[in-house]
């Protein structure tokens, strides 16, 4: 894996196509500042476009996933933002619309994790709080150690939440339970999160690396086009009526049926061997 360091984010891709993006600020339990939030969008967009990336794993260094926004930078200018360089500390930073637009752009990270046509995995070695909570829920899968926790901490600082956390939570546990979780903001331990269906796999701390790697490798070895359509089908099942869903499902089925990967899978089945997929 070739790692690239960018302040408090690390990014690297293994030979089998697993792209790992790591929050890397262990001294503050991987809280991320405004610049890193913007950079995360760039890294996820690159992962979405890169045909060599089969699976995306989002995780944190040490014993935390991400404990949210670095409160020391909340509302502060992003030094790499062109408007920040132009206006500095002027009144633009008190403008609600501008700051809302900036947050909306950074929240694209959650949308990419949720919508990109590749499996996404949150590896949770410890707490996922605030926007870390939202980003973990945005992923397709969450593999958690027993030391992990989910903390919808927004209400604790007098805010309603961002990065789509309530959207993902309501789809996972229903609106009534989502309201309770968000309005109280209490820590959800790993066992409870697993029982609620918020965690896909719950493993011993020492097994987290091996379990996540095996899970990611298995997905990376699958047929990329079929996996993309499966993800699209699951999303559509939450959003569409049955007739519209069946239209989409039928198109996706035939599109996949005409790929080289499907032909390879059928040949491998007949020849009693493992298929070799190339994403075509």
Image (cartoon, rainbow, N blue to C red):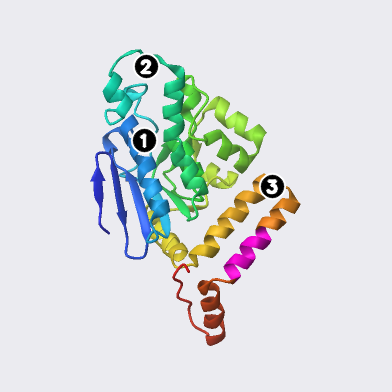
Label 3 Cα crowd, 10 Å radius (few <14 / some 14-19 / many 20+): few
Residue 76 falls left or right of residue 143: left
Query: Magenta span covers which residues?
Result: 249-257
Q: Residue 92 carries which label?
A: 2
- Could you tell me if residue 65 is visible in this image? no
The image shows residue 119 at horizontal and vertical percentages of 48, 55
Q: Viewed as shown, does residue 67 lie left or right of 229? A: left
- Secondary structure at badge 1 equals helix
Closer to the camera in the image, 25 or 232: 232
Nearest to the eye among marks 3 and 2: give it: 2
Disc ID at residue 240: 3
User: Which of the two discs, 1 and 3, sits closer to the camera?
Assistant: 3
Report whether residue 90 is seen. yes
Rendered position, 59 above or below 29? below
Q: How crowded is mark 2: few (under 14 residues within 10 Å), some or many (20 or more)?
A: some
**Which of the numbered marks, if any, corresponds to residue 37?**
1
Closer to the camera, 73 or 204? 73
Q: Is 267 placed above or below 139 here?
A: below
Cα separation, mark 3 vs mark 2, equals 40 Å
Q: How crowded is mark 1: few (under 14 residues within 10 Å), some or many (20 or more)?
A: many
Could you tell me which residue is drawn at 73 percent across and 48 percent down?
241
Q: Considering the image in quadrants, where does the N terminus appear?
A: bottom left
Q: In this view, does 205 lie above or below 101?
A: below
- State the predominant SS element of the stretch in magenta: helix
Foreground residue among 195 and 41: 41
Label 2 or label 1, whichever comes before in sequence order: 1
The secondary structure type at the circle numbered 3 is loop
Marks 1/3: CA distance?
31 Å
Residue depicted at 35% across the width and 48% down the height: 21
Residue 62 at what x, y percent from top left? 30, 44
Label 2 sits on a secondary structure element that is helix
């Amino acid at each position: 894996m070739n790692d690239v360091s960018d302040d408090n984010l690390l990014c690297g891709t293994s030979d089998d196509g697993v792209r790992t993006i790591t929050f890397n600020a262990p001294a503050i339990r991987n809280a991320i500042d405004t610049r890193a939030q913007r950079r995360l969008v760039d890294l996820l967009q690159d992962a979405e476009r890169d045909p060599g990336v089969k699976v995306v794993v989002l995780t944190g260094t040490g014993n935390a996933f991400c404990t949210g926004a670095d409160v020391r930078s909340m509302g502060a200018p992003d030094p790499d933002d062109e408007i920040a360089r132009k206006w500095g500390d002027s009144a633009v930073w008190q403008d609600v619309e501008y700051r809302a637009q900036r947050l909306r752009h950074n929240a694209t990270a959650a949308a990419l994790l949720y919508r990109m046509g590749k499996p996404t995995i949150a590896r949770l070695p410890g707490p996922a709080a605030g926007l870390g909570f939202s980003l973990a829920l945005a992923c397709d899968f969450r593999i958690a150690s027993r030391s992990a926790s989910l903390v919808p901490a927004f209400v604790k600082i007098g805010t309603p939440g961002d990065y789509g956390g309530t959207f993902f939570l309501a789809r996972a546990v229903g609106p009534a339970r989502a309201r309770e979780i968000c309005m109280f903001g209490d820590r959800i331990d790993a066992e409870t999160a697993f029982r609620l269906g918020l965690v896909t796999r719950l493993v011993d701390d020492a097994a987290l690396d091996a379990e996540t790697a095996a899970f990611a490798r298995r997905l990376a070895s699958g047929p990329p086009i079929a996996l993309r359509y499966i993800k699209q089908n699951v999303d559509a099942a939450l959003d569409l009526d049955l007739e519209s869903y069946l239209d989409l499902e039928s198109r996706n089925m035939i599109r996949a049926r005409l790929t080289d990967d499907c032909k390879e899978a059928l040949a491998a089945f007949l020849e009693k061997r493992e298929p070799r997929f190339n994403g075509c």
